[in-house]
Amino acid sequence: MQTFDYVAAQTVDEAVSLLASKGDQARVLAGGTDLIVQLREGRRQLETVVDVKKIPEANVLSYDAQNGLHLGAAVACHRIYNDPVISKTYPGLMDAFTLIGGIQIQGRASVGGNLCNSSPAADSTPTLIAHRTMCVIAGPNGQRVVPVEQFCTAPGRNVLENGEFLLSLRVPAPPNNFGAHYLRFIPRNEMDIAVVGVGSSLMLGDDKSTVTDARIALGAVAPTPLVAVEAAAALVGKPISDDTIAAAASAAASIARPIDDMRGTVQQRIHLTGVLTRRTLQGALSRARGES
Amino acid sequence: MATRIHVQTTLNGEAAEFLCDSRQSLLEVLRDDLGFTGTKEGCSNGNCGACSLQIDGVLVDSCLVLAAEVDGKSVNTIEGLASPAQLHPLQQKFLEHAALQCGICTPGFIMAAKALLEKNPKPTEHEVRYWLAGNLCRCTGYDKIVRAVLDAAESMEASA
């Protein structure tokens, strides 16, 4: 592997000042499951690797019913799904966090890193969007907060400016009668990259039928994860039914603009978008009703 | 030339220290500098699991860990598994079930299975197969490996 300097930053300020002074020549290391491969294969040339795992704010993992989930950007997947309270509170997040790579990858890979890698096919991003997650970004001018659906700007690119890094994610506590679900299509049982991934969430009224809020996010069908605004609008204010779910699925499929590649064709991906939207809405519904 | 980094760690329960370059993976340092060649190099990109070991009890691919990152941490490799008196039950059952042919993937499978049984002492066949999805074997067809792990779980449970 190429030579670079390794610095384990102890504080936010130390990481920011290193990143600001090195520009494109520095990159943040969390789990390393993408970065170390890129360095070894020469796909990325760096002078400095800034390990952020020793920064307390990047390593926080806490939940309470008032503030929701505070997830440090460097926290590895296994820590999240092995937390009994958090995994029970956010089954729609666990759907994604438990299928990123195999067990060894989940022992290192962070959700923040999955987001910062900014792949259109990232498994965690659609479900973070469905949960209305906010990104806390640290930089030379202090901290700023960006809704997760605005974080990715193109394949491999995001809103992080020079000197900035993703510090943590804030996921609201699930309100009453809330349910979320993530599914992806892959041609094998596990260990693959999504051909299409969909994350959906629903909030129901006290009648457990009327949809008061909905959010649907699509992965791997555009240069960035997409929010299916009209698909959600097809559900809100109405009693949930097979017909409204079908309308939402068709609206979601209509905004997919995927590419053909070795994983799937345009036509297959558009079809899968509709199928996974329907299935994730059914999954979210049964969780919102407390049935699963 | 970057500065060499001084790393203090616990390796299979014993204090260990080494100097490394920032670009060296944990796998590289273990095999090339410390002589711990039990951990194998397969793909070196996180797909095959041959380099599996535990850091602070967590199963990882050591090709995707910088050696500098294990400062202050506890590393457990295949070399720490057997006692001087006997093999670990997983090792014994891999032999009994002939769960290996060329053997390159075996240390990774055994370390992964060890991590599984620590978390879940009585896994189902489905759980074993799912857990071991990050380990590749091109010889056995996996079936003998899965049987060896299930049998080891049973014998460890019986002797616990």
Image (spheres, rainbow, N blue to C red):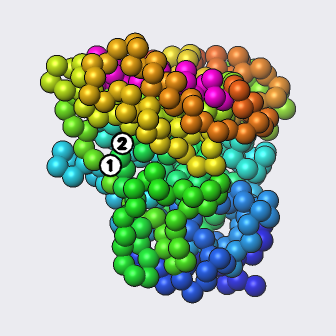
Where is residue A70? Give x, y as percent: 31, 54
Amino acid type indicated by mark 1: Val
For residue A286, side relative to residue B51 (left or right): left
Quadrant in which residue A291 is drawn: top left
Q: Residue at x 31, y 40 (%)?
A: A86
At a point 21% along the width and 20% down the height, the residue shown is A208
Residue B157 can be seen in this image: no
Mark 2 or mark 1, which is nearer the start of the sequence?
Answer: 2
User: Magenta region: which residues?
Assistant: A269-292
Q: Which mark is residue A131?
A: 2
Residue A175 showing in the rendered view: yes
Instruction: Tell me if A22 is positioned left or right of A261 in this view.
Output: left
Left or right of residue A67, residue A233 in this image: right
Residue A289 part of the magenta segment:
yes
| Whether label 1 touches label 2, CB < 8 Å | yes
Instruction: Count every numbered label the image shows and give the total.
Output: 2
Tell whether A45 sits left or right of B74. Answer: right
A236 is higher (above) or lower (below) than B35:
above
Q: Residue A171 has which mark?
A: 1
Front-most of A53 and A215? A215
Under circle 2, the secondary element is loop
Q: Amino acid at mark 2?
A: His
Q: Looking at the picture, how far across and down is residue A67, in whole percent?
A: 21, 52
Residue B152 image offset from top left, x and y in percent: 57, 22
**In the picture, which quadrant includes the C terminus of chain B?**
top left
